[in-house]
Image: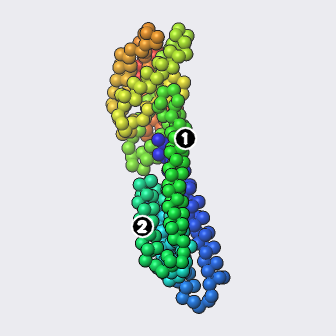
Amino acid sequence: MNTIGRRSIQEHLLFWVQLSIMFLMIGAFVLVLVVSPEGTPRRGRYLGLILSLLVLVAAAFALGRLGRYHLSVVATVGVSVLGVWGSLLLDPAIGTSDFVPLVYVTISVMLSSILLPMAITVVLAVAQYIGLVVIVAHVPASSIINWPSFLCYILIVSVLSIAVNYVLKQQMEQLQENSIRDHLTGLFNRRYFDETLDNKLLRGIRTEYTVGLILVDVDNFKSYNDRFGHAAGDLVLQSIANFLFEQVHMADIVCRFGGDEFAVILLGATHESLADVAESLRSKVKELDIRYSGKSVGPCTISQGLALFPEHGSTREGLLATADASLFKAKQSGKDRVVM
């Protein structure tokens, strides 16, 4: 899955959630000032709680801007938890004559189901629900308020929030996966290649490590379509894609660059290791036995153009231009060869 794209969406969502909470807290602060009588202990306690929550959500917002995503999420969900249970501790009316503020425990479950893993959300929901049951069982208001309906409402809303957001997360992840995968070969596509190479080069600039790039072109690919049909051509691409994926290390990245071209990103490569990998691919691809309708389509060969960051370029465009020029030279020189 495209981790970069997924995190970007999550960070964008978190930003708007935090901004909404800030406005809600400010609105609640103004409401307490207007509604609660001046000089009463309840007014002071609520204003103090709201100000504390505002400080916490501001800290969560700052953590998000600093790239501390997980801490920012925990602090954001913590605001919703502390808001409800803090009001329970500060306001003696809650649990004795008023259950309404406790309904807001569902907000923390909703936020957690959106921003945190499902396991954490379930634990949070169960813990809070147990807390509500304990409160209801030990307060005087349980004899005058329809507490079974209250608890059923909390349970239903919590379960629905978890279930709905789980389904939405799964669908979003599937859409993201489809957007970065080539439908024919199953490899990452050009979009993923561009994003990933940019990211690796930026990291390479900061940490001074190298990035190798291999552009792979299937020699005489049109002949497979002409002799056996497009289905056979698709089979050739799928077979070579599987071959490339199996030959590289887990830390390296193989993408379908477009048409009959593939791209391989090798992290921490040297001149020697980059050339060795390319030469190994060139020699081993000839051993593939690709059969269509029971007939061999013949031995396959590939031409490859190599480039190494930072020597051959410090940007994606520069590195690609060098690799593409090397690939063109390999094709012009007779194909089935490696050029750096």
Q: Residue at x 33, y 27 (%)?
A: 276
Tell me: 89 left or right of 17. left
Would residue 132 be visible to someone looking at this image?
yes
Residue toward you, 311 or 243: 243
Q: Secondary structure at mark 1?
A: helix
Tell me: 30 left or right of 243. right
Q: Which picture quadrant has residue 268?
A: top left
Q: Quadrant of the C terminus?
A: top left
Q: Residue at x 52, y 59 (%)?
A: 156
Where residue 328 appears, as percent x and y from the top left, is 51, 22
Where residue 91 appears, as percent x and y from the top left, is 51, 81
- Disc number for residue 130: 2
Q: Residue at x 47, y 31 (%)?
A: 187
Ranked by sequence position, the earlier of labels 2 and 1 is 2
**Which residue is denoted by mark 1 in the rendering?**
175
Where residue 58 appears, as percent x and y from the top left, is 53, 69
Q: Is residue 36 above or below residue 308?
A: below
Residue toward you, 29 or 72: 29
Residue type of the residue flagged with mark 2: Ile
Q: Secondary structure at mark 2?
A: helix
